[in-house]
Amino acid sequence: MVAIVAIFGTGSNAVWLHYEHLGELRGFSFRELVTLTTIGGLLMVITPVIALKIFEKIGGFLPIIVGCALQAIIVALYLTNPSPTIFAGCIIALNILICILLPYARMLGANLDSSGRIAAAAGGGDFLGSFAGPLFGGLFTVGLAGNGQFLWGLVSTFFVAAVLCVVAQRHTKRHARYWRHPPVEAPLFR
């Protein structure tokens, strides 16, 4: 779980390093970029509820796999399409998507291990991705042309995270009895 969250977090955070630069190349002023970020921030308030509903309805690693695929598509549009409208939509969509994936990963971790170790480790993976993303993004000069290497690097992070989810899903199905602790039946207060 740590590796999955760290890898998709790296890809997500690498994009934000070039956010202002790419926005200016598409004709956005700094004030307009702040407005876009604010809109995304306001919409992020409901994302934990969305993550919970997805967890209750679907569960497992499939939502993370789908989320990684959506991130790859959105990042490809974000980097390759010169349209200001598509750029704005991608910014808002990326804000929402990462804020659904992170709480979902923590819920899944808590479900896999009732002791809380995996859920706590997912937080560590998020921290690692927040550090590694800008480091990874800083290796590339990004503009409206020449995004090929950066794009493939980011898409690769989402692909690797999705593959790790598939492996983890198979592992947890095969070894489910080792992941769950028996429920405590003693009353909390005597």
Image: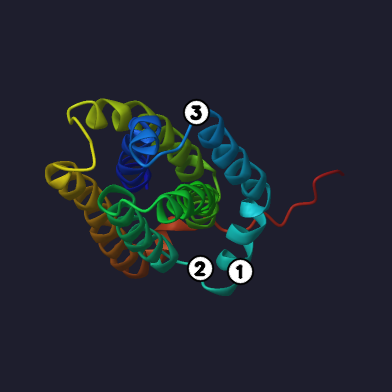
Q: Which residue is mark 3?
A: 30
Colour setup of the view: rainbow
Q: Earlier in the sequence, mark 2 or mark 3?
A: 3
Real-space Cα separation, disc 2 to disc 3, in angstroms: 39 Å
Element on which disc 2 rests: loop
> What amino acid does circle 2 point to?
Gly
Q: Nearer the viewer, residue 131 or 36?
A: 36
Q: Which mark is residue 59?
A: 2
Element on which disc 3 rests: helix
Residue occupying the point 51% across, 50% down: 92
Give residue 137's position: percent from left, percent from top. 25, 32
Q: Nearer the viewer, residue 147 or 85?
A: 85
Give residue 82's position: percent from left, percent from top. 31, 51
Q: Are marks 2 and 3 in contact (CB under 8 Å)?
A: no
Corner quadrant of residue 62: bottom left
> What amino acid does circle 3 point to?
Phe
> Left of 75 or right of it: where is 55?
right
Q: How many marks?
A: 3
> What amino acid does circle 1 point to?
Glu
Q: Which residue is mark 1?
A: 56
Q: Earlier in the sequence, mark 3 or mark 1?
A: 3
Give residue 141's position: percent from left, percent from top. 19, 30
Relative to 17, does residue 84 appear above or below in the rendering?
Answer: below
Name the image quarter holding the C terminus: top right
Find the residue positioned furthest to the right: 190
Q: Residues within 10 Å of mark 2 (few under 14, many from 20)?
A: some
